[in-house]
Amino acid sequence: MTTTRRILVMGVSGSGKTVVGRLLAARVGAEFIDGDDHHSPSSIDKMARGIPLDDEDRREWLETLAGFLADHRERQVPLVIGCSALRRRYRDILRRGDPELLIFFLDGSRERLRQRLGQRESHFFKGDAMLDSQLAALEPPGTDEAIPLDIDQSPAALVETCIAHLTSTDTR
């Protein structure tokens, strides 16, 4: 299947944004951008020290990602971005890059997320306090804004759900 859509795979750290995003991008013939790769060095340092980012830390990062979306939209090139996009205002910044941005929300219990984070070896995001900070900041998108996906499913099953949704919306 191919698509010309721009897609956001969002959720807190440990939800599977990168794994699902990469698999989805491969299935739909899109480029994948991991939002984590575009944090400033100071933001990465902050998170590595267990200090949560604030809105100012995130602003430039979100604007950079919105720029990628705008560029791909202008060229009608498919793109999948994995990004936490915790608050509605953050997702609004991303939608400035593409007002038709399709959002998949990876949702799961704190216990499941904690388990996944504990299995990571080389990621700057560590610790329960950081997870709790993200969960506290999370404004879960409603069904008017995103398609919710339960992370207790396998990444392959999640991608199949995304593909089914894309197939139904791209043929309208």
Image (cartoon, rainbow, N blue to C red):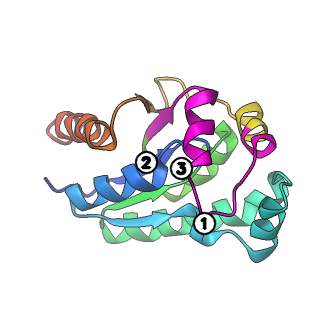
Task: Tell me the amino acid under the disc marked 2.
Answer: Leu
> Mark 1 or mark 3, which is nearer to you?
1
Q: Which mark is residue 63?
A: none
Q: Position of residue 27 (x, y in %)?
A: 21, 56
- Spatial distance from mark 3 to mark 2, Cα to Cα? 6 Å
* Residue 67 picture quarter: bottom right
Please report the bounds of the magenta region as a residue range. 104-131
The quadrant of the picture occupied by the C terminus is: top left
* Residue 4 picture quarter: bottom left
Q: Position of residue 62 (x, y in %)?
A: 65, 59
Callout 3: 10 Å neighbours few (<14), some, many (20+)? Answer: some
Depth check: 127 or 27 in front? 127
Q: Residue at x 30, y 59 (%)?
A: 25
Callout 1: 10 Å neighbours few (<14), some, many (20+)? Answer: few
- Spatial distance from mark 1 to mark 2, Cα to Cα? 30 Å
Q: Residue at x 52, y 41 (%)?
A: 15
Residue at label 2?
101
Residue at label 1?
122
Q: Earlier in the sequence, mark 1 or mark 3?
A: 3
Residue at the far bottom in the pictured view: 41
Q: Is residue 160 above or below residue 57?
A: above
Verify CB contact (< 8 Å) between mark 3 and mark 2.
Answer: yes
* Residue 36 picture quarter: bottom right
- Spatial distance from mark 1 to mark 3, Cα to Cα? 31 Å
Label 3: element kind: helix
Label 1: element kind: loop
Label 2: element kind: loop
Q: Residue at x 30, y 55 (%)?
A: 23
Magenta span includes 109:
yes
Count of marks placed on residues: 3
Residue at label 3?
95
Left or right: residue 90 versus residue 54 is left
